Amino acid sequence: MDYKVLYRKYRPQDFSTVVDQKEIIEILKNSVKNQKISHAYIFSGPRGTGKTTTARIFAKYINCLNPTDSGPCNECDICNLNQDNVDIIEIDAASNTSVDDVREIINNVKIAPAYSKYKVYIIDEVHMLSPSAFNALLLTLEEPPSNIVFIFATTNIENVPITILSRCQRFDFKKITDSSMFEHLKNIAKKEKIKIDEDAIKEIVYLSDGALRDALSILDQLAFDNKKITYDTVANHLGIISNKKIASLLDNIFNNKINDVLTILDEFKNINIDYRYLLKKLLDNLEIFAIKIKNNELNYDYSKVVNLSMDIANLINQININLNPYSLITIILLNYCDNEQPLENTNDKKKIEQNTQTDDSIEEKSTFDENIKNIRTNNCLVNVQKKYLTLIQNFWSKFIGSISENKKIMMLLIDSDVVAASDNYLIITNELESTVNLINLNLETIENLFYKEYNKEYKMISLTKNEWLKVKEEYIKNIKNKKKYQMIEEKKVLKKENNIEQIATSIFDESKIVIEGE
């Protein structure tokens, strides 16, 4: 007999074995009992939470000849058809996205069910349909035949048009709780006679992040022989790191022990710890740190914990996985260390110098004059034009590639964008405030590298994307008011309260100025 993987072997066949979606199941069962079947449902939620499985059970349930409190009886003629039931049609929208695919469905909708009371269309990953396909489907959803039921499943509900959502009953599937998943895995391990420690189960639960299918796949992967699965087994095969190690890393950061921070990061990198897993672990432990600080159990700066948490959260979304993510992670973490602390010995000093100086040098401990940011932003807007922006943007990727030997500067710029350019100035944006600060602290180095490749001197400034949006909005407002920007010398001392509106006393004629996004 062919081996069946665990997540398929233990896929629920009725509602009683669906894990952690009790409220949804009750509503679906009651709709059948009260004979109030809707023509369209949409199941949304994270992967591995039972959306497609529930859709299949429900499709059988509404056609079952002897429905029970647990769902379909799985014994009647209709239930026994299983995959041979031509009245239950499953479609993967990821590979059937076109309007022609939807038109085929529409044409088949007109044909009555062959055996069952309802013909059911289960469309998985429905958000992948093209706009024209959604429009074609909309016509059928507005006036569907009485014996047709659509069940849509999606992991990205935000990408489904509101016109579709408004015609469906929506059910939001939640992540499986740790406790429910733990008990489920424990029971399956017992049935399969898999020897496993509870600590190992807990780590599998953590790694699966609420997706039961992922948890069963991990358990299946580790149960390749009859040896007992321990925490170390999970760690060795999946490359995990303990919370104790993560806590040690954070302690070293907040105690400004740069050497130890670099040593631990090198250790993680050398054993190929997945950077996404590392970032998730850091966030989880920062939450614990935050609670302990508020309970006076830790004497660390709470604002540092908050800022680091926000930077890591942004980093998860912004990091470029085609490059070495550990360089950027290192920069972000070191930004929270006070490197004015004396080094323990000469060897440590040499190690830090090798990591933070020469071609990879990054200035971290000095401050940046906000007046320079305002002045350069203003001066860029004096002669900002689309043609300059286009030239720089076309060269930007090549420039970043040319400084690959200077890894730390390259990692600062890799996820940054040039959003405005004049003949002598550039404005660079980044999502992370910490990265923006580091760019501004290293402008001279970046400008010299750029001159070396582009053979033209440019003065640069970096803003967060939110700062840029405010500058851009003010710029457009000034254009409408027929104001004009004037050059300001960088040597001129400005009061801190001066902003772009105060600096810019006037503006170019609107027809002569083009800015990205207008």
Image (cartoon, rainbow, N blue to C red):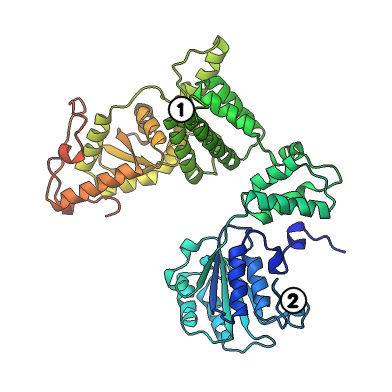
Query: Quarter-wise, where is residue 77 in the image?
Result: bottom right
- Is residue 123 at least partly visible in the picture? no
212 over 374 or under it: above or below: below
From the viewer's perspective, is 287 left or right of 86? left
Give the label, 2 or 1, closer to the camera: 2
From the viewer's perspective, is 150 left or right of 236? left
Q: Quadrant of the C terminus?
A: bottom left
Query: Quarter-wise, where is residue 174 in the image?
Result: bottom right
Q: Which mark is residue 336?
A: 1
Identify the element where label 2 is drawn.
loop
* First in residue order: circle 2 vs circle 1: 2
Tag 2 and tag 1, C-beta contact below 8 Å: no
Identify the element where label 1 is drawn.
loop
Residue type beneath disc 1? Tyr
Image point (62%, 84%), residue name: 118
Image point (64%, 79%), residue name: 62
Residue 448 locus on image (x, y percent): 36, 28
